[in-house]
Amino acid sequence: MEVEGASVVVTGGASGIGAAIARAMAAAGARGVLVADLDGGGATAVADELAAAGIEAIGRAVDVADPEAVTAMVTTAESAFDGLDIVVSNAGIGTGEGVDAPLEQWQRSYEVNVLAHVHAARAALPGMLDRGSGAFVHTCSAAGLLTMIGDAPYTVTKHAAVAFAEWLAITYGGRGIQVAALCPQGVETALLREADQGIAGRAVRAAGPVLTPGEVADDVVAALGDGRFLVLPHPEVAEHLRGKATAPDRWIAALQRTADALQP
């Protein structure tokens, strides 16, 4: 799907990858962008920035774990922009915890990293299917294809996010719905800086180059135009995925050694 002339919703859009995607969509000619985030002030600031550049933009405070809030967000975009073409479901959280993470953290990770994508699809699909076109971009992380050393809830829920994106693509691709799973490795965001306090952040920074949010956003726009499902701003993720598929025992052993070496 071409971004030029499209209407877009971006969740987690107040900062980091989400804000960069909102800016990239506007730069690529989107006709309207709704920026949503739990931080409503931050979302409005990004929207105001886009509006100052001549793009119709709206900022909204939205908890993506709340299905009613997500439905209201989609309804607002559909009304303001005369339909909704692209939903970038980008909001996500990490924990830096292992199997002993409090159950509340497991539940919140599931709500934000998985169910938020479900809520967005349930709200936006009817309008897209009526028009015969639309696109979803789900930020799933390389952890959704591989693993995140030091963060069990993040790894598990991001795997589920990839699975849901695959299911959407298979089920609705023949009806004009494009789906992209964005799976970057290290990106210089607040989420990574928070993870730097534990093993998870050290593992990400040791794994390869850390990209800027803008570099990731540019790849998202290109992937939509190319019709790609897997969006891999770090090409080495594809190599790791092949290694995992062809020699899983060797792949796990290598990560075991890495995890052991990162222990304080």
Image: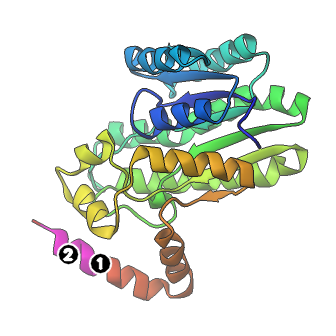
Q: Position of residue 192 (x, y in %)?
A: 30, 48
Above or below 174: residue 40? above
For the question of whether residue 21 can be seen, the reply is yes
Above or below 226: residue 112? above
**Neighbours of disc 1 within 10 Å: few (<14), some (14-19), many (20+):** few
Instruction: Give the numbered dot on residue 260.
Output: 2
Considering the numbered disc 1 on the image, is that residue within a helix, a strand or a loop? Answer: helix
Instruction: Give the numbered dot on residue 231.
Output: none
Between 99 and 118, the one nearer to me in the picture: 118
- Residue 58 belongs to the span the image colors magenta: no
Above or below 105: residue 164? below
> In the image as oriented, which residue stretches furthest toward the left?
264
Q: How is the image coloured?
A: rainbow
Q: Is residue 35 left or right of residue 154?
A: right
Q: Main secondary structure of the magenta part?
A: helix
Q: Which residues are magenta?
A: 257-263
Between 69 and 19, the one nearer to me in the picture: 19
Above or below 151: residue 261? below
Q: Residue at x 50, y 18 (%)?
A: 47
What type is the residue that disc 2 sits on? Asp
Q: Is residue 240 left or right of residue 204?
A: right
Quarter of the picture holding the N terminus:
top right
Q: How many marks?
A: 2
Q: Residue at x 61, y 52 (%)?
A: 181
Q: Give the distance between the C-alpha atoms of the residues marked 2 and 1, in whole angstroms.
A: 6 Å
Circle 1 residue: 256
What type is the residue that disc 1 sits on? Gln
Considering the numbered disc 2 on the image, is that residue within a helix, a strand or a loop? Answer: helix
Q: Are marks 2 and 1 in contact (CB under 8 Å)?
A: yes
Quarter of the picture holding the C terminus:
bottom left
For the question of whether residue 164 can be seen, the reply is no
**Neighbours of disc 2 within 10 Å: few (<14), some (14-19), many (20+):** few
